[in-house]
Structure formats: C-alpha cells, structure tokens
Image (cartoon, grey):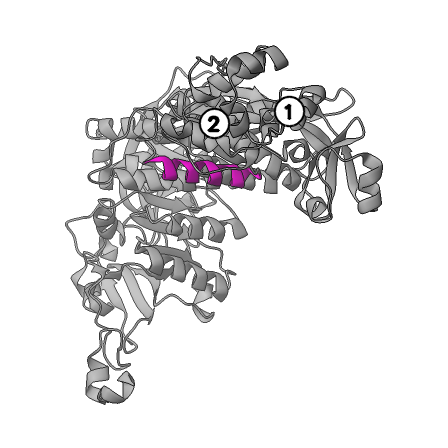
Amino acid sequence: MLWLCLQFPFLPLDVFPHEEGAAVAVERQQVVSANAAAMRAGVRQGLGLSGVLGLVPGIRVHERQSEREAELLRTLACWAEGFTPTVCIASADELLLEIGGCLRLFGGLEALRGMVRAGLEAQGFEALQGIAPTPLAAQWLARAGDEEACEDSALLRQRLGHLPVEVMGFMNAKDMKTLAALGAQVLGDLLALPATGLRRRFGAELPLRLAQALGEVPDLREAFVFPERFAQSLELPAKVEHAGMLLFAARRLLAALCGWLGARAAGVVECNLLLEHEDGMPPSVMTLALAEASADLQRLERVLRERLEHFRLEAPVWRIQLRVESPQTLSGRSLGLFGQEAALALAPVIERLRARLGKDAVQALSLVEDHRPECASAYVSRDQAAGRQAGKNAGKKVVAGRKSRPLWLLPKPKLLPECNGVPQRGGDLLRLAGPERIESGWWGQDEDATGDVRRDYYVACTARHEWLWIFRDADGWWLHGFFA
Amino acid sequence: MSSAAQPLPTLQSVLQRPDVWRGDRLAQTSDVLASGYAALDAELPGGGWPRGAVTELLADGAGLGELSLLLPVLQTCVKEGPLALLAPPFAPHAPAWAMALPLSSLLWVQADGAEIAWAAENLLASGALGALLAWLPAQTDARTLRRLQLAAEAHGAPAFIFRQAAAARSASAAPLRLELGGNSAGLTVRILKRRGPPLAQVLHLQVPRPCLRMRPQIRQAELKPLPRFSAV
C-alpha cells in the first residue's frame, strides 16, 4: 500500500474568487488560511482578525464557508477517482489516494505525481503532497510540507521523527502545553518514549495514533463513496452575469466529471450544465455535446469554451450544476492501423463546429429507398455511426443510381417561368434527355410532406450550358436539381 | 565562421532547388494528385491538383460540371480521410453522390457568413480531412484566403474553394486559380493563376455527364425542344 495525501492549505480561500491582493479566510475571528500575498506581509494561521488588519490594512477578509469547502472537496474526490478507485476524504482539507496499485498504469510515482500536480494546477488548486505507506504518515508528511516520498515502511520511524509534533493535529491545547513542557518538539521525541507512559499521561489516543502512523496497528479509513449518478454542483463565489466568467468554475466540474468517468471506463456524448438563477427562476440549461462518447477533459473544455462564448445569460447565476444523464461505456480502443486515426482526429472538430454553428450544422448523408427525389437522401445529424451504416448498404441499393441523378437538389422545387409552353431560365431550355416518369407516394397524407407525386423528369440545358434537372407536372415546369 | 568556409551558391545551384521556380516554366512539385484529365494535368504545375494548398474555382451558376471535374480526385482523397462539403449552395442528393463516393465519408457542414471561413480553417487544421470543398462568399478578403492557404499547407489536405466569377478580379493567396465555364463540348477551364507562365488558351474538358455519355459533342440538331406543356 502506498498512500498519497493531498493537503489543500488554501481550500478555505479556493471557494472564493482568486484575487491578486492579500486575502484571508477567517473563522471565529481567527485566520484559517492566508494567500501568498498575505503570508508575505506576515499573516499566519491562527492570528486574530484585529492583528491581521493591523498588519495589512486593506486586506480582503472572507468568512469561512465550510459547506462550500466540503462541496469542493467532494468534487476533487471525484476528479481523483480518475487515478485510483480508493479515495478517502481524510479531513476538511485532505484527500487520501491509495496509489500503490496504479503506479504501473501511470508510469511510475514521479509521472503520477506530475499528473496530479498538473491536473490540480489546471483547476487552480495548490496542494501539498505527502507519500507514505500508511495513511496517517502521508497526512503528517503533507501537513509538514515534506513532499519527499517515503516508500519504505522501515524508513517511516526515521522520516516521521523529524516532523514537529503539531502535525498530529488532534490534541487539545492543554496536552500540547504538557508536551512542550516535556521538551518534546518533534515526533522523534515522542516515539522514543515508552507507550505506557504516554498513555497514562495523554490518554489512549496518542500511542494508538503513533502506532498507526508506523503501520504497527491497522488504520481503517472510510472510502469515499462515489456518486452513482454524476450531478455535482458548485456555488459560485459571486453572482455571475457574463457567461464567460463561468468558465473557471465549470472547468472544475468538468475535471471532476472526467475523473468520475475515467473510473467507470465510460464516456459522455452529452452533459448538461445547469445554471441556477435566484428568485425561483427555472435554471438555464447549457448542453455540451460531443461527436462521440469521450472522457477527454480537453475536448469537453473546448466545447464548453465555444458554448460560453455565444451564450447569453438571462439572469445572474449563483450556482452551477453539471449533470450526466447517460454515461456510455467506452470500448477499449486499440491504436488504429489504417484510417481510424483520421476519424478520431476529426471528432473534436465536429464538436467545435456543432458548438458554434448549431447542433444540426454537421450532417452525414445516407440513402433512403424512395423513388421521390426529395425523400431519397437522409441527413443524419446523429453521428457517423448512422452514416457508416448507410455506407455499408450503399452498394446494394443503387437501383435509383443507375439512372442519372443530379449532385445538387433543391429542397423544394422551384417553379420555372414558361414562354410558349417552353420553360425558361435565361432563355429557352433545351432538352437533353427524358422524360423519366416518377410516380410514387400515393400513401402520403400530410400537407407538408412530399406526398403523392406524378412527374416527368427531363435533363435540360440552359444557354449558359448549365445542366438542370427539371420536371413537369400538372402545375407546370419545375427546376429540381443541378448536374454540377 | 562556417559561412566563410562554405562556397557561395551559384545561380545554377539556386535554380536547381526544388522550392525555386522560374516564372517562364511550371513549378516542379511532386505533392500533387492527378486530376484524371490529361489535358488539365499537362497544364497544372507538377501535373495535378496541389496537395496542401488552396485551389480556387471560380464559376457563376451551378450545373456546369464543376463537381464532376473534381470527382476523380475526390475518389483518391477519400482513401485518406473524410470529405467535407462546407456551405454548399444546395443540398447534396445522396443517390448521385453514392454513385461516385462512399457516403459514409461525406460531411455536410452548413454555415454562413464569416463562420464559413472559420469552419474551413478548423476543418483543415484538424489534419484529418481527405479534402475540403468550401463555397465561400465572393466578398471573402485576401487575408482570410491567406489563413486558409496556411492551414492547408500545414496539414497537407487539398482545399477546393468555390467562389463567384466576380472574385477573379480580387487578389488571392491561392497558388492555383481556375475560372470555369461551359460550352457545348463540356467544361471550359481558364487558368487565371498558377506557378508558371500564364496560359492564354482555354482548356476544354469532357466531364462525365448524366446522359449522352457516348457522344463527345452535342450537336444542336440533336437537341429536341422540350415538349410543350399542355394542361391536363
């Protein structure tokens, strides 16, 4: 077993919008987290509010919002599921990931740590990493800011020995004072003392914890239960009036989604971003659609960005929620030998086009067995799968194709003017071939459907040598296509 | 230091470089796709449609055979990736396309205005297309075409851009520009711009046509007037 502890020292501040200047989060008038600018000015954890204002008069002070921190941490846990199936929420600002089983998959410890760090950075988080064979030791290393991995349990006693006693974090102030009076400043001092003496003086918890950290006593952790249906929400730090400002928060949710999907070997074709407004207005829904099922964060982000650019908010948004209705299992993909890569590379572009130009902007063609020209093509928006299916059948039904058919078809035939009974288009039209009788669709009932047609089709040529497909029916001459 | 040691390139050696072409002869490029028309290949630099470049086809109206001209090369391109029809003037008619190309590799993209150029650039930049056929508005400016040319160059797919014949007068970054017209024998092609000497004569190509396939020329005498329309 190898545990990676991610400790988020700035989590109380991460729930608020990032700002350049000094900022602190306070709870009961005491600093719980201070950003880098505040730290430079000398603000430390535990400092009183009046002291902070004395140090940095213009500092931004946020009242700590524990509920939103917990929400954020759950989102992060979902994201971490992309790395390992065992994730625990160890405390209010710590996640524990069991990584012993997945090191090989990610190419070793250093590679995995790099990926974790990069993933957090992209979402705007900073975390201290502690790595040890026991969960408690990993937590303590992270709290002390000791990021060097300790993979060997034989070295644990030595590595923990250097950490200050404050990292334990569960003892009350009186006991801490007693420890200081004893002269125990680092954990090594405590480990050197006999456990019975410690128990008598400080109760049973201290020797138990020490033994758990060293791996002598089992330390059972409650694993984070991943939601079966993904519907994570984030409360925004401030009301947002421009869609572009949702990007940052939405990206955190997408990262969580991708981790969640990764653990299920699933992908999404469509997910909904619910933008919740105040005053009981129904939430706006922004649908992110992909060309094929995917769990790729970058692709989802690109689609999100395109959508946000063109999205107009009806009212300020205070909370966003990401929902997935039907994740699809991704089939394992072997690397393509010929040709398949092309389809893979095209899918992200199709998504971008759809996101900007509209859902039906990109369509595939397929054949329909119908003699009426208007009904012979189907434009399938729903992905190439359908088109591929039609492609397979294309060889079989070229019955209609043996006759001459134009490459361009007018969706609705256009009435041609007529002079002495001869149709006109920049002069008299000349007949090249025809007539070909097309008579079908007597079953059609609806008004706007093509319905029953009885037409004589001709190939005709204009004076400018444009080849047209025209037909005559009871109502006159009609232009229907171009032999381009 | 090293520049002093190297001999100065002579004019002859510079002229031998593959990326240098002289204005009085056709550029020598090997990255071309045969057009399927010998008469056209003979006049195109390298002997075919350029790959990784924008080719402009200027024509007014539809039905001259402008797509039939491209069908042979598209049949080659489709082996490398899907074909995108971007903002065509009309809806593609599946039975006709199915005779020439596998339908599964056709993408019909609808866009209008400035979005067409944006979509064209994105499609080219994906590097996954077999070929791009785009119908750009006549007022597309030279900068947009230059961007498309760069995108095509970087990713190696041929891009065929259809525009109105009026665009012939405006500047364009496309290395090859053709003006298409029709006559009784088939399609006429006037090369407006190529990497080579200007070509005065007009090429006459016989593109496949829906009927009269056997007859090279349509004689006026063979044309029958359309039957008079009489009320039923």
> Which of B116 and A467 lies nearest the eye of the viewer?
B116
The image quadrant of residue B196 is: bottom left
Q: Is residue A123 magenta?
A: yes
Distance CA(mark 1)–CA(mark 2) = 37 Å
The disc at residue A80 is: 2
Instruction: Nearest to the eye among marks 1 and 2: give it.
Output: 1
Give the main secondary structure of the magenta stretch: helix
Instruction: Specify the subunit that label 1 lies on.
Output: A
Say which quadrant the N terminus of chain A sits in: top left
Q: Locate residue A314 relative to residue A484 in the image: left or right.
A: right
Could you say which disc has been placed on residue A179 in the image?
Answer: 1
Residue A33 drawn above or below residue A328 = below
Given contact means CB atoms under 8 Å apart, are the residues at marks 1 and 2 in contact? no
Question: The magenta stretch spans which residues?
Answer: A108-124
Above or below residue B170? Residue A472 is above
* Residue B108 % position (x, y): 39, 40
Count of marks overlaid on the render:
2
Q: Identify the residue shown where x is 21% and y is 67%.
A: B46
Q: Chain of mark 2?
A: A
In-front residue for pair B162/A392: A392
Magenta-drawn stretch contains A288: no
Q: Residue furthest left?
A: B214
Going 30% across and 56% down the picture, which residue do you hit? B156
Q: Earlier in the sequence, mark 1 or mark 2?
A: 2
Q: Quadrant of residue B194?
A: bottom left
